[in-house]
Image (spheres, rainbow, N blue to C red):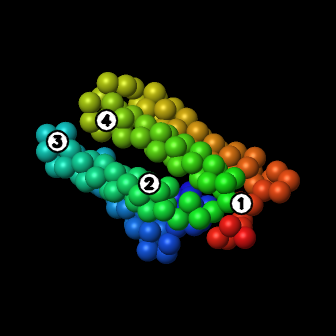
């Protein structure tokens, strides 16, 4: 999904590598955090969770600074609009994951396992199906320039 977002936004190679690398480090931190047991090791678990959130912030910042305020501005207007939709969909839906994880069994335990799993599935559907919905709708219209490079 992030690669597709970078392609739509015309991100430079180093930016795409940074964004995808941050995603991998974010996932790694989250997985390590969730695997730390017993619960008495909350400092370690919270540290890894914080590292994961740190890489999420770096990823979002790179998308905003390098792509949204940079390379996408050289793309056709419909591509800029598509990128904007995808960027906000990604930021908003992906921001829900750490909230659900914090409320779930790995941290505060305020929601049941079933509720946590359901919310994570809903976030997956929103982010993944939502992204492809915007791509298909935006790029299938007559005269769409979604795959045009450098405004051509």
Circle 1: is it few (<14), some (14-19), or many (20+) Cα within 10 Å?
many
Label 2–label 1 contact, CB within 8 A: no
Where does residue 91 sit, x and y in percent of width and height?
46, 45
- Pick whichever, 32 or 20, lies toward us: 20
- Pick whichever, 95 or 121, lies toward us: 95
Q: Is residue 116 above or below residue 128?
A: above
The image's mark for residue 45 is none
Going by the picture, which residue comes out furthest to the right? 142
User: Mark 2 — residue?
Assistant: 64
- Kindly identify the residue that appears in the image at 49 percent across and 75 percent down: 13
**Label 1 secondary element:** loop
**Label 3 secondary element:** helix
User: Mark 1 — residue?
Assistant: 146
- Pick whichever, 90 or 9, lies toward us: 9
Instruction: Specify which label sits upstream in the sequence, 1 or 4.
Output: 4
- Kindly identify the residue that appears in the image at 63 percent across and 49 percent down: 81
Label 4–label 3 contact, CB within 8 A: no
**Label 2 secondary element:** helix
The image's mark for residue 42 is 3
Q: Locate the N terminus by quadrant.
A: bottom right
Specify whether 82 is left or right of 48. right
Q: CA distance from mark 3 to mark 2?
A: 32 Å
Circle 3: is it few (<14), some (14-19), or many (20+) Cα within 10 Å?
some
Specify whether 46 is left or right of 106. left
Label 1–label 4 contact, CB within 8 A: no
**Label 4 secondary element:** helix
Q: CA distance from mark 1 to mark 4?
A: 37 Å
């Amino acid at each position: 999904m992030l690669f597709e977002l970078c392609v739509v936004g015309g991100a430079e190679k180093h930016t795409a590598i940074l964004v995808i690398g941050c995603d991998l480090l974010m996932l790694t931190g989250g997985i390590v955090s969730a695997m730390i047991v017993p619960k008495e090791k909350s400092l370690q678990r919270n540290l890894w969770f914080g590292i994961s959130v740190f890489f999420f912030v770096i990823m979002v910042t790179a998308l905003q600074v390098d792509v949204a305020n940079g390379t996408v501005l050289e793309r056709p207007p419909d591509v800029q609009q598509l990128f904007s939709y995808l960027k906000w969909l990604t930021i908003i839906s992906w921001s829900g994951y750490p909230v659900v994880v914090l409320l779930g069994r790995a941290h505060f335990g305020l929601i049941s396992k079933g509720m946590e799993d359901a919310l994570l599935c809903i976030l997956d559907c929103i982010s993944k199906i939502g992204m492809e919905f915007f791509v298909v709708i935006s790029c299938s219209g007559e005269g769409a320039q979604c795959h045009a490079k450098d405004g051509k």
